[in-house]
Amino acid sequence: MDKIVFLWNGYEPLLRIVAVGTLTYIGIIILLRASGKRTLLSMNAFDFIITVAMGSAYGRILTAKQVSLAEALVTFCLLVSLQYIVSWLETRSQKFARVVAGQPSLLYYQGQFLEREMKKKRVRKAEMLAAARSKKLENLEQIEAIILETNGSLSVIKKSNKKGDSTWKQSLG
């Protein structure tokens, strides 16, 4: 049975944390750089899961002396590979993208708050008004639409006199 240590266990465990932690950190940076900018974009649900898993694995690697550097790097390679495969499939299949990332949701349109969709997406009116204020919009008459994006952010679309389909109409269609 392992002995329980409360205050001090010597220098060896500390040196292991510094060495393995530093090398793993460098490995993560190399993997993220090699996997491309898509890995670092704003997150959808799958990206969030990968991020949490990487943080959890990194924490475990630092504190569990049974986990080797090789095992740590294989763990990160697996997570980055899964993220790469999912993003590759997302760019090639609309159906797959909808399953993984979802679709943007229209919450406000031409002077009307779409209450049913707001409740379904659990977004409060106050949050949408805050998003409008952050865009320096003084009143709702200046707003054409407010959209909940797949990454959880709110996009505020100002009214426009230009003709043609806007980007938000295309993304919801």
Image (cartoon, rainbow, N blue to C red):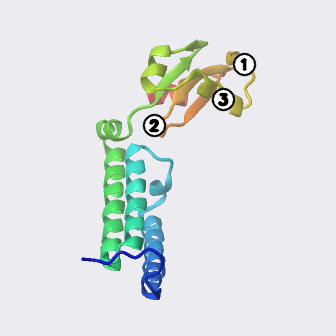
Label 1 element class: loop
Whether residue 167 is visible, yes or no, is yes
Expressed as whole percent of the image width and height from the top left, the position of residue 96 reads 30, 40
Label 2 element class: loop
The residue indicated by pointer 2 is 150
* Badge 3 density bin: few <14, some 14–19, many ≥20, Cα 10 Å: few
Q: Amino acid at mark 3?
A: Ala
Q: Residue 60 is drawn in which quadrant?
A: bottom left
Q: Amino acid at mark 1?
A: Asn
Q: Is residue 2 above or below residue 126?
A: below
What number is the disc on residue 139?
Answer: 1
Expressed as whole percent of the image width and height from the top left, the position of residue 143 reads 65, 21
Q: Where's the N terminus, which quadrant?
A: bottom left
The residue indicated by pointer 3 is 130
Task: Residue lying at the far bottom in this picture: please name it.
Answer: 11
The span from disc 3 to disc 2 (Cα, nearest Å) is 19 Å
Please indicate whether residue 127 sits to the left or right of residue 40 in the image: right
Marks 1 and 2 in Cβ contact (< 8 Å) = no
Which numbered disc flags the more N-terminal residue, 3 or 2? 3
* Badge 1 density bin: few <14, some 14–19, many ≥20, Cα 10 Å: few
